[in-house]
Image: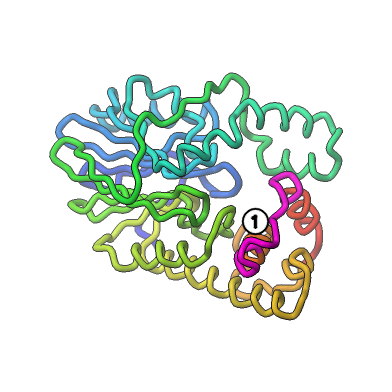
């Protein structure tokens, strides 16, 4: 049993480090982090809409005086549930990997707001119902795109008061530009969506080998507390579970690819076994398509996001 609560709100993990948690960690319900030292503060990710980001910032300011003026925001990757609230941290330096920053232009909040209006109108049918299921709790109207102001490749070390914070690029893996946030002195790592705990990982970009290497970095790191992008605070056991899932899905998909089975059929055919209890199991559709693209050396294109969400909607309705 974890020593950390998994309840909505701010969790003090010690030495001026905090995790902001959003159960149950499903679509859009991401975690964030706060690192403080000597009156300075660094925020790890913002949230999916302005209301939730304001609530998070209010909780942080109430718990840590340094959060009254956050000097640095780190976006772990480009998905909106980790960066759409950037505009509310005025005056901060916003850091991301170069690849992550470029990817933020692909699905801006106004595009998602328009898509959700169509989904709620009923015009999109079963796909619309699934999109409302995934994203209906969020308000994307009025979100101003606020891109990073500093980008890097590889690794970057920043100072927060007397603390050193290491930013380690591990993408492309979950997305094109993922990074880890390591606070060595406090033995804490914030992983972004390199880790989903008790929720099914989704591999938008790949290759899977990069994601496995990211897990190996986490397992080798001198860290006691690991804050995932979604789900409860974990330790190396949570990392191993994600790594094992990725290996299992890779191997199962490879067998079906070699047998000539189409990717959508393979996603339906793979038994989830020990992972069936994880939320959002239908994400296997995306994972298999991404793996097939990798197996083919890029010759087999993956469907676009709308088609993939349609396939996930179909699989989510089917008993497994």
**At 17% from the left edge and 43% from the top edge, which residue is drawn?**
163
- Residue 225 x/y as whole percent: 31, 57
Numbered circles on residues, count? 1
Q: Split into 4 quadrants, where in the image is the N terminus?
A: bottom left
Residue 148, picture quadrant:
top left
Question: Can residue 126 be seen in this snapshot?
Answer: yes
- Residue 72 x/y as whole percent: 30, 32
Frontmost residue, 29 versus 14: 29
Q: How is the image coloured?
A: rainbow
**At 49% from the left edge and 38% from the top edge, which residue is drawn?**
102
**At 19% from the left edge and 39% from the top edge, which residue is drawn?**
159
Callout 1: SS: loop
Q: Split into 4 quadrants, where in the image is the C terminus?
A: bottom right
Residue 302 among magenta residues: yes
* Magenta region: 293-308
Residue where numbered disc 1 is placed: 280
Vertical order, 225 against 148 (above or below): below
Q: On the rendered structure, is 237 left or right of 288?
A: left
Vertical order, 296 against 307 (above or below): below
- Residue 99 x/y as whole percent: 45, 44
**At 77% from the left edge and 54% from the top edge, which residue is drawn?**
311
Q: Residues within 10 Å of mark 1 (few under 14, many from 20)?
A: some
Residue 154 among magenta residues: no
Question: Can residue 277 be seen in this snapshot?
Answer: no
- Residue 168 x/y as whole percent: 33, 52
Vertical order, 248 against 313 (above or below): below
Vertical order, 124 against 228 (above or below): above
Q: On the rendered structure, is 127 left or right of 270?
A: right
């Amino acid at each position: 049993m974890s020593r950390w609560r998994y309840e909505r709100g701010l969790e003090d993990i010690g030495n001026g480090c905090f995790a902001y948690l959003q159960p149950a960690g499903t679509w859009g319900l991401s975690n964030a982090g706060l690192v403080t030292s000597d009156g300075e503060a660094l925020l790890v990710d913002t949230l999916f809409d302005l209301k939730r980001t304001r609530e998070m910032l209010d909780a942080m300011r109430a718990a840590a005086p340094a959060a009254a003026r956050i000097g640095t925001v780190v976006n772990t990757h480009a998905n909106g549930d980790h960066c759409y609230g950037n505009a509310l941290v005025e005056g901060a330096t916003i850091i991301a990997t170069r690849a992550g920053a470029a990817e933020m232009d692909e699905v801006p909040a106004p595009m998602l707001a328009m898509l959700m209006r169509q989904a709620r109108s009923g015009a999109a049918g079963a796909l619309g119902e699934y999109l409302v299921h995934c994203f209906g709790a969020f308000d994307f109207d009025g979100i101003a795109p606020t891109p990073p102001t500093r980008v890097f490749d590889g690794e970057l070390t920043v100072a927060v008061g007397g603390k050193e914070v290491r930013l380690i690029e591990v993408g492309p893996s979950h997305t094109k530009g993922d990074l880890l946030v390591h606070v060595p002195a406090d033995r804490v790592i914030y992983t972004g969506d390199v880790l989903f705990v008790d929720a099914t990982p989704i591999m938008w970009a790949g290759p899977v080998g990069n994601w496995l290497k990211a897990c190996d970095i986490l397992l080798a790191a001198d860290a006691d507390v690991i804050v995932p992008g979604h789900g409860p605070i974990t330790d190396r056991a949570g990392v191993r579970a994600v790594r094992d899932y990725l290996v299992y899905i890779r191997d199962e998909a490879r067998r079906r690819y070699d047998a000539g089975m189409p990717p959508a059929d393979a996603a339906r055919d793979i038994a989830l076994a020990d992972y069936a209890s994880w939320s959002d199991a239908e994400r296997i559709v995306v994972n298999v398509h991404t793996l097939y693209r990798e197996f083919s050396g890029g010759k087999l294109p993956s469907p676009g996001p709308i088609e993939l969400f349609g396939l996930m909607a179909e699989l989510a309705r089917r008993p497994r």
